[in-house]
Amino acid sequence: MLVHTVLFKFNPESSDAQIEACADDARNLLAKIEAVHSLYIGAPADTEVRPVSVRDYGLMLTVLFESIADHDVYQKHRLHDEFIANNKDSWASVAVHDAE
């Protein structure tokens, strides 16, 4: 199993509608890629803030893959490219964390 987690930080001028559109695109585009085992996207949870808490992102995407090969299919898929093209102008930064 490979866990692919992406933290999206949005530009200050990005609207709530743009952030929601990014989340919708993840659900409606990325989740359709056959290599995806499961997918979740959400905003920081309203949990108690602790010294180790990280909340400096707008959305977190977590995608599970059965294998690195499935991850590689996802990275090259046209729907992944479409997701990036649709949303990249609203991102200030993107951080990717992959774990196996």
Image (cartoon, grey):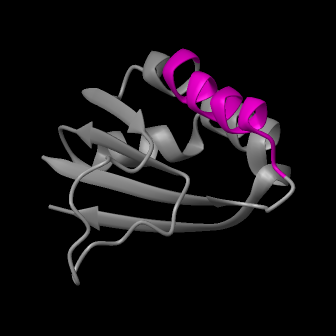
Quarter-wise, where is residue 81 in the image? Answer: top right
Task: Identify whether 40 is placed above or below 67.
Answer: above
Question: Residue at 33% across / 30% down in the picture?
Answer: 39
Is residue 15 on the magenta stretch?
Answer: yes
Residue 62 in the figure: left or right of residue 65? right
Q: Residue furthest front?
A: 48
**57, 89: nearer the viewer:** 57
- The residue nearer to you, when weighing 37 against 61, is 61
Taking the magenta stretch, the answer to whether it contains residue 3 is no
Secondary structure character of the magenta stretch overall: helix
Farthest-out residue, bottom = 51
Image quadrant assignment for residue 50: bottom left
Up-down relation of residue 82 to residue 94 (above or below)? above
How far from the left and from the top, in percent, is residue 25?
Answer: 63, 25
Residue 56: x %, y % from top left = 50, 69
State the residue at coordinates (56%, 53%). 58
Left of 51 or right of it: where is 90? right
Q: Compared with residue 86, is residue 97 higher up or lower down, i.e. above or below?
A: below
Total tally of numbered discs in the picture: 0
Residue 21 is drawn in which quadrant?
A: top right
Q: On the rendered structure, is 4 left or right of 7?
A: left
Q: Residue at x 27, y 27 (%)?
A: 38
For the record, the magenta segment spans 14-28
